Image (cartoon, rainbow, N blue to C red):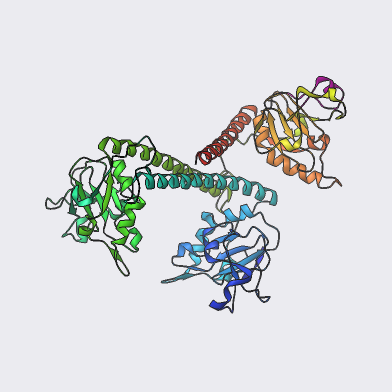
């Protein structure tokens, strides 16, 4: 690291009175710790001080200490220039000598290869620290600047997809919370304040102690009794983390006939926690298992009648019930709750048939939340795997390269050998006979992020086509490519069309897959921009575009790669539409 930049310190010489006001700002510790790319909305006020080092776009910020060695030296790349911006005193900064690709460095510096090196440098006992000097010995792996940008964009897109699913999960959870507030009526609610007309208003209020009885968790056990045996017990974390218990989160214990066994439909409660908001967390047990007990830090509740598991699971974690339980928490450093007091908790119960309907409804929402959470986890695992492949370790060989499903039988070809480059034109706008016809006619402003385009905003007539330099471009074989300021916006034509002179469209030959060429758009754009940069007016000609060199596999492999990226694009589009629909419904 020390070969490519220099370090700087965070704020110094400040007292408590200097913070919370002033015309300057500072990047907080949590902003650095929690974000691989800093969040400009997570800065706080401080007085201007010309003696302090200012944070600039592209600076890399590191935390200097944490409670565990795995969390020291967390890196955060700062994305924007802001006036009078400093760094908190529990971090240090690093300024690269050359401009960097923010996305690439953000991912690379949190990759397993780099994090493993940093963790080894952590020193301490109750709190761990890291030396700025030692950090400069960290080894990193750097491709060329153009490849940094490509990898950065690719990983940035994956991050956006993860964020999309996380936002969906949050949105659905908020929806669920709102539904629970309506469903489980408070004492102050009126009969008109009822959730959804499809449910009745025939609900009754009962104390928990009126509908069942409590039982205790394991007792009289020592450390030696656990970890083996023919019986099992439900762990504290299983109860705390799950509104419906997870049968795969149980642990072994010896059989003991004196202990109370957990049965399907039992409701399990935690008895203590570090905060009052977390005591008395409820968990409904979903299945019967032989010789199943409950851990000693929880108690159980067995309803007198069979219950709907989904309904109770949601009702007992609703804001109305949780607020009552929180008020019962007692303690200072650790909070506990009384079994007896818990039996005075008031709950609201509809008929059994309505319990089942509501339970199914909320269960479906939970399944939707879980689906998006799993998608986020899957994409994160994909990203982690790609990082391990892309950021090659010293021990890696050339055979250990990303995506073994593709061959290495690729050849260099000029784009002009793979496709015909076709420019466009504009019919005279003063002649009405040339306009409002049936022939699609695109301008660069119509090309956005969509992979395919189906119809243009303006149409020209055949007379207009014949009296201009515009040409008909064939559908499914043409990739529109903008050639002027804003070079490299692309889309695949799904219907025959023409364009204005702001395009150099790529009409692929019969042995070339258009989906594959489209997947190379970023590479083509970068090379086109470099060529255009030497011109007075930022533009690339058809002749220049045709000279761009690409690496091309055989047609079958082109089709496989093109199909892969088409599926990814379609998946992204699908989730964007779903997010729009959910937001619209909300």
467 is within the stretch colored magenta? yes
Q: Residue furthest top?
A: 462
Q: Position of residue 498 (x, y in %)?
A: 77, 27
Count the marks.
Answer: 0
Q: Is residue 502 above or below residue 145?
A: above
Describe residue 258's horizontal placement relative to residue 164 as left or right.
Answer: left
User: Where, by quadrant of the figure, is residue 198 drawn?
Assistant: top left
Does any portion of residue 141 appear in the rendered image? no
Using the image as rendered, state which of residue 114 and residue 396 is in the foreground: 114
Describe residue 454's horizontal placement relative to residue 376 as left or right.
Answer: right
Describe residue 15's horizontal placement relative to residue 186 as left or right.
Answer: right
Q: Position of residue 552 (x, y in %)?
A: 68, 34
Q: Which residues are magenta?
A: 459-474
Q: Which residue corresponds to the image point at 68% horizontal and 75% vertical from the top-left?
A: 50
Using the image as rendered, state which of residue 541 and residue 144 is in the foreground: 541
Does any portion of residue 545 appear in the rendered image? yes
Q: Position of residue 380 (x, y in %)?
A: 50, 47
539 is within the stretch colored magenta? no
């Amino acid at each position: 690291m020390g070969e490519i930049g220099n370090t700087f310190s965070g704020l110094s010489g400040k007292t408590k009175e200097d913070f919370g006001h002033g015309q300057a700002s500072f990047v907080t510790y949590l902003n650095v710790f929690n974000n691989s790319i800093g969040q400009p909305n997570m800065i706080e006020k401080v007085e201007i001080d010309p003696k302090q080092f200012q944070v600039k776009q592209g600076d890399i910020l590191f935390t200097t200490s944490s409670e565990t060695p795995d969390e020291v030296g967390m890196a955060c790349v700062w994305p924007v220039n802001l006036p009078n911006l400093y760094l908190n005193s529990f971090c240090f900064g690093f300024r690269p000598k050359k401009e960097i690709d923010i996305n690439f460095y953000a991912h690379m510096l949190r990759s397993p290869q780099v994090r493993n090196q940093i963790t080894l440098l952590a020193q301490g006992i109750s709190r761990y620290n890291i030396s700025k000097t030692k950090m400069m010995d960290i080894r990193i792996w750097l491709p060329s600047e153009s490849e940094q940008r490509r990898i950065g964009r690719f990983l940035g897109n994956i991050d956006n997809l993860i964020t999309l699913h996380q936002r969906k999960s949050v949105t659905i959870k908020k929806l669920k919370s709102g539904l629970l507030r309506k469903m489980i009526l408070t004492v102050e609610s009126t009969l008109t304040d009822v959730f959804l007309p499809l449910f009745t208003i025939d609900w009754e209020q009962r104390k928990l102690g009126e509908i069942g009885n409590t039982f205790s968790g394991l007792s009289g056990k020592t450390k030696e009794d656990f970890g083996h045996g023919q019986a099992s017990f439900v762990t504290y974390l299983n109860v705390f983390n799950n509104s419906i218990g997870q049968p795969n989160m149980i642990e072994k214990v010896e059989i003991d006939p004196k202990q109370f066994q957990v049965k399907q439909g039992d409701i399990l409660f935690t008895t203590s926690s570090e905060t009052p908001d977390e005591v008395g967390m409820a968990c409904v047990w979903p299945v019967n298992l032989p010789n199943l007990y409950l851990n000693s830090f929880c108690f159980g509740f067995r309803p007198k009648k069979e219950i709907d598991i989904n309904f109770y699971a949601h009702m007992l974690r609703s804001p109305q019930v949780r607020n009552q339980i929180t008020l019962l928490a007692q303690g200072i450093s650790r909070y506990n709750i009384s079994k007896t007091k818990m039996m005075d908790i008031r709950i609201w119960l509809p008929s059994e048939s309505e319990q089942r309907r509501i339970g199914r409804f909320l269960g479906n929402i939970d399944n939707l939340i879980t689906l998006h959470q799993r998608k986020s986890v899957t994409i994160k695992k994909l990203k982690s795997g790609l990082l391990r492949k892309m950021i090659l370790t010293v021990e890696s060989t050339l055979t250990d390269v990303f995506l073994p499903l593709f061959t290495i039988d690729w050849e260099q070809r000029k784009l002009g050998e793979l496709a015909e480059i076709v420019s466009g034109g504009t019919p005279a706008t003063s002649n009405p006979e040339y306009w409002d016809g049936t022939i699609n006619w695109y301008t660069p402003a119509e090309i956005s992020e969509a992979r395919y385009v189906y119809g243009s905003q303006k149409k020209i007539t055949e007379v207009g086509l014949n009296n201009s330099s515009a040409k008909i471009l064939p559908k499914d074989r043409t990739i529109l490519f903008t050639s002027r300021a804003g070079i490299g916006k692309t889309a695949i034509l799904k219907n025959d069309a023409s364009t204005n002179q702001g395009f150099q469209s790529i009409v692929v030959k019969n042995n070339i897959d258009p989906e594959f060429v489209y997947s190379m758009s970023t590479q083509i754009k970068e090379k086109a921009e470099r060529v255009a940069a030497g011109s007075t007016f930022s533009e690339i000609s058809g002749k220049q575009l045709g000279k761009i060199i690409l690496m091309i596999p055989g047609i079958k492999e082109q089709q496989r790669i093109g199909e892969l990226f088409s599926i990814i694009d379609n998946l992204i589009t699908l989730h964007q539409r779903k997010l729009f629909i959910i937001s619209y419904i909300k």
